[in-house]
Amino acid sequence: MDLFVIDTPLQLLNAIEARQYFGINSCHLFMPKWKFWPSTAFEKLLKEMEWKSINWFEMDIVTK
């Protein structure tokens, strides 16, 4: 199973380039959902390539 875990739009761009370079077919994508990186920041790049699944998981900075 091919899996990419990215955190920023630039890392998503790098993942797309890596898939093209290495000829990796459809794979899974995991991305944290941060308040300072809204999902809209990734939308255009996500449309560039097909993914088996796109999984978002909630992240937040907790300070005590």
Image (cartoon, grey):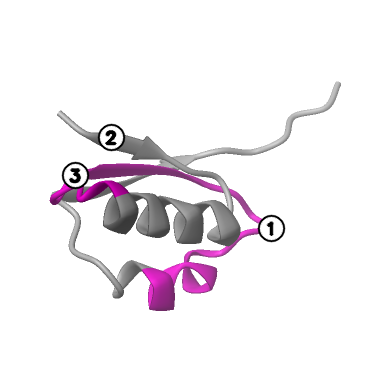
Q: In this picture, is 42 found above or below 30?
A: below
Q: Position of residue 62 (x, y in %)?
A: 74, 29
Q: Is residue 32 magenta?
A: yes
Residues at circles 3 and 2 in contact by the CB criterion of under 8 Å: yes
Q: What residue type is disc 1 on?
A: Phe
Q: Residue at x 28, y 34 (%)?
A: 3
Q: Residue at x 38, y 50 (%)?
A: 18
In-image side of 64 versus 25 (left or right): right
| Extreme-top residue of the structure | 64
CA gap, disc 1 and disc 3: 26 Å
Q: Residue 3, which numbered label? A: 2
Q: Which residue is mark 1?
A: 36
Q: Residue 27, which numbered label? A: 3
Pick the residue in front: 30 or 10: 10
Q: In this picture, is 31 found above or below 64?
A: below
Q: Residue at x 69, y 58 (%)?
A: 36
CA gap, disc 3 and disc 2: 6 Å
Q: Position of residue 49 (x, y in %)?
A: 25, 67
| Extreme-right residue of the structure | 64
Q: What residue type is disc 2 on?
A: Leu
CA gap, disc 2 and disc 1: 24 Å
Query: Which quadrant would residue 38 be assigned to in this image?
Result: bottom right
Residues at circles 1 and 3 in contact by the CB criterion of under 8 Å: no
Q: In this picture, is 4 found above or below 8?
A: above
